[in-house]
Amino acid sequence: MSKRCKYSLVFKSQYIFRGFKITGLCMDDKRLVVVLGHSNKSPLCPRCGRTVSVIEGEHVRVVRDLDVAGLRCFLQYPEYKVHCRCGHRGFEKIGFVREYSRCTRRFEEWVSMFCPHMSSDLRNGLACSVRI
Protein backbone atom coordinates (compact mmCIF):
# COMPACT_ATOMS: atom_id res chain seq x y z
CA MET A 1 0.00 0.00 0.00
CA SER A 2 1.45 3.37 -0.98
CA LYS A 3 1.73 6.47 1.24
CA ARG A 4 -0.98 8.17 -0.78
CA CYS A 5 -3.52 5.51 0.21
CA LYS A 6 -2.53 5.70 3.89
CA TYR A 7 -2.87 9.49 3.92
CA SER A 8 -6.23 9.25 2.14
CA LEU A 9 -7.59 6.97 4.86
CA VAL A 10 -6.46 9.40 7.56
CA PHE A 11 -8.08 12.38 5.84
CA LYS A 12 -11.30 10.52 5.13
CA SER A 13 -11.69 9.65 8.80
CA GLN A 14 -10.61 13.04 10.25
CA TYR A 15 -11.88 15.63 7.76
CA ILE A 16 -15.55 15.59 6.82
CA PHE A 17 -16.84 18.08 4.28
CA ARG A 18 -20.63 17.94 3.84
CA GLY A 19 -21.66 17.35 0.26
CA PHE A 20 -18.10 16.46 -0.76
CA LYS A 21 -15.79 13.48 -0.64
CA ILE A 22 -12.00 13.34 -0.77
CA THR A 23 -10.91 12.20 -4.22
CA GLY A 24 -7.17 12.82 -4.00
CA LEU A 25 -4.17 14.30 -2.24
CA CYS A 26 -1.26 16.15 -3.87
CA MET A 27 1.81 16.98 -1.82
CA ASP A 28 5.09 18.78 -2.46
CA ASP A 29 7.79 20.18 -0.13
CA LYS A 30 5.75 23.06 1.28
CA ARG A 31 2.07 22.35 0.70
CA LEU A 32 -0.66 19.75 0.67
CA VAL A 33 -3.66 19.99 -1.64
CA VAL A 34 -6.74 17.98 -0.70
CA VAL A 35 -8.84 17.43 -3.83
CA LEU A 36 -12.58 17.17 -3.17
CA GLY A 37 -15.36 16.00 -5.43
CA HIS A 38 -19.13 16.33 -5.10
CA SER A 39 -20.98 13.50 -3.42
CA ASN A 40 -24.31 12.45 -4.90
CA LYS A 41 -26.23 15.18 -3.07
CA SER A 42 -27.78 18.06 -5.00
CA PRO A 43 -26.39 21.56 -4.37
CA LEU A 44 -28.18 23.91 -1.97
CA CYS A 45 -29.34 27.46 -2.61
CA PRO A 46 -27.59 29.94 -0.26
CA ARG A 47 -30.67 32.19 -0.14
CA CYS A 48 -33.54 29.78 0.61
CA GLY A 49 -31.71 26.53 1.48
CA ARG A 50 -33.61 24.34 -1.01
CA THR A 51 -31.95 21.77 -3.22
CA VAL A 52 -31.33 23.11 -6.70
CA SER A 53 -31.81 21.06 -9.84
CA VAL A 54 -30.66 23.66 -12.40
CA ILE A 55 -26.85 23.79 -12.58
CA GLU A 56 -25.55 26.43 -14.99
CA GLY A 57 -21.83 25.74 -14.68
CA GLU A 58 -18.93 24.60 -12.57
CA HIS A 59 -15.90 26.48 -11.26
CA VAL A 60 -12.84 24.93 -9.59
CA ARG A 61 -11.99 26.76 -6.39
CA VAL A 62 -8.90 26.56 -4.15
CA VAL A 63 -9.08 27.79 -0.54
CA ARG A 64 -6.60 27.80 2.35
CA ASP A 65 -7.20 25.43 5.27
CA LEU A 66 -5.45 24.64 8.55
CA ASP A 67 -1.84 23.42 8.33
CA VAL A 68 -1.23 19.68 8.45
CA ALA A 69 2.07 18.34 9.82
CA GLY A 70 3.91 21.57 9.08
CA LEU A 71 2.58 21.79 5.50
CA ARG A 72 0.30 24.53 4.23
CA CYS A 73 -3.00 22.85 3.40
CA PHE A 74 -5.33 23.86 0.58
CA LEU A 75 -8.71 22.48 -0.47
CA GLN A 76 -9.51 22.23 -4.17
CA TYR A 77 -13.13 21.57 -5.07
CA PRO A 78 -15.68 22.20 -7.81
CA GLU A 79 -18.34 24.79 -7.04
CA TYR A 80 -21.60 24.77 -8.98
CA LYS A 81 -23.21 27.90 -10.36
CA VAL A 82 -26.93 27.40 -9.74
CA HIS A 83 -30.25 28.97 -10.66
CA CYS A 84 -32.89 28.46 -7.95
CA ARG A 85 -36.68 28.76 -8.04
CA CYS A 86 -36.46 31.59 -5.47
CA GLY A 87 -34.66 33.71 -8.07
CA HIS A 88 -31.11 33.31 -6.77
CA ARG A 89 -28.52 32.97 -9.49
CA GLY A 90 -25.01 32.37 -8.21
CA PHE A 91 -22.81 29.79 -6.51
CA GLU A 92 -24.12 26.99 -4.31
CA LYS A 93 -24.09 27.03 -0.50
CA ILE A 94 -21.01 25.35 0.94
CA GLY A 95 -20.88 24.92 4.71
CA PHE A 96 -17.12 24.93 5.28
CA VAL A 97 -16.32 28.15 3.38
CA ARG A 98 -18.05 31.53 3.07
CA GLU A 99 -19.04 32.91 -0.29
CA TYR A 100 -16.10 34.60 -2.07
CA SER A 101 -13.73 33.73 0.80
CA ARG A 102 -10.20 32.50 0.09
CA CYS A 103 -9.99 30.35 3.22
CA THR A 104 -12.16 27.94 5.20
CA ARG A 105 -14.26 28.97 8.19
CA ARG A 106 -12.07 27.00 10.59
CA PHE A 107 -8.95 28.75 9.25
CA GLU A 108 -10.67 32.10 9.83
CA GLU A 109 -11.50 31.05 13.41
CA TRP A 110 -7.90 29.95 14.00
CA VAL A 111 -6.54 33.29 12.77
CA SER A 112 -9.10 35.21 14.86
CA MET A 113 -7.75 33.53 18.03
CA PHE A 114 -4.46 35.39 17.47
CA CYS A 115 -6.02 38.82 16.91
CA PRO A 116 -6.06 39.92 20.59
CA HIS A 117 -2.39 38.98 20.95
CA MET A 118 -1.41 40.70 17.71
CA SER A 119 -3.17 43.89 18.74
CA SER A 120 -1.26 44.09 22.02
CA ASP A 121 2.02 43.49 20.16
CA LEU A 122 1.21 46.35 17.80
CA ARG A 123 0.43 48.64 20.74
CA ASN A 124 3.80 47.80 22.28
CA GLY A 125 5.57 48.70 19.05
CA LEU A 126 6.90 45.21 18.28
CA ALA A 127 5.62 45.32 14.72
CA CYS A 128 5.92 48.99 13.84
CA SER A 129 6.02 48.34 10.08
CA VAL A 130 2.34 47.35 10.11
CA ARG A 131 -0.16 50.18 9.81
CA ILE A 132 -3.46 49.99 11.67
Image (spheres, rainbow, N blue to C red):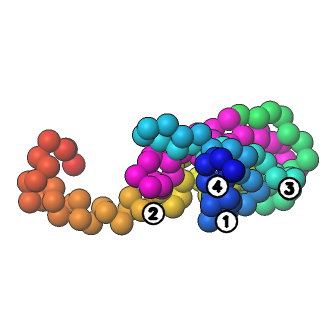
* Within-10-Å neighbours for mark 1: few <14, some 14–19, many 20+: few
Residue appearing at x 59%, y 40% in the figure: 26
Q: Secondary structure at mark 3?
A: loop
Q: Point out the stretch of residues depicted in magenta.
A: 60-88
Quarter location, residue 77: top right
Residue 14, relative to residue 31: is it above or below?
below
Residue at position x 42%, y 40% in the image: 30
Circle count: 4
Q: Residue 109, which numbered label? A: 2
The span from disc 4 to disc 3 (Cα, nearest Å) is 26 Å
Reply yes or no: does residue 22 show up in magenta. Answer: no
- Could you tell which of marks 4 and 1 lies nearer the N-terminus? 4
Q: Secondary structure at mark 1?
A: helix
- The location of residue 12, given as percent across then percent down, is 68, 60
**Amino acid residing under circle 4:** Lys
**Residue on which disc 1 sits:** 13
**Front-most of 99 and 30?**
30
Of the pair 69 and 121, the residue shown nearer to us: 69
**Which mark's residue is nearer the viewer, 4 or 2?**
4
The residue depicted at 89 percent of the width and 42 percent of the height is 54
Task: Give whichever of discs 3 and 2 has the lower sequence position.
Answer: 3
Q: Which residue is mark 3?
A: 41
Q: Is residue 70 left or right of residue 21?
A: left
Distance of mark 3 from mark 2, alpha carbons? 27 Å
Label 4, on which residue?
6
Residue 24 seen in render: yes
Disc 1 residue type? Ser
Neighbours of disc 3 within 10 Å: few (<14), some (14-19), many (20+):
few
Residue 117 appears at what percent x and percent y?
23, 65
Three-letter code for the amino acid on which mark 2 is drawn? Glu
Earlier sequence position, callout 4 versus callout 2: 4
| Three-letter amino acid code of the residue under disc 3 | Lys
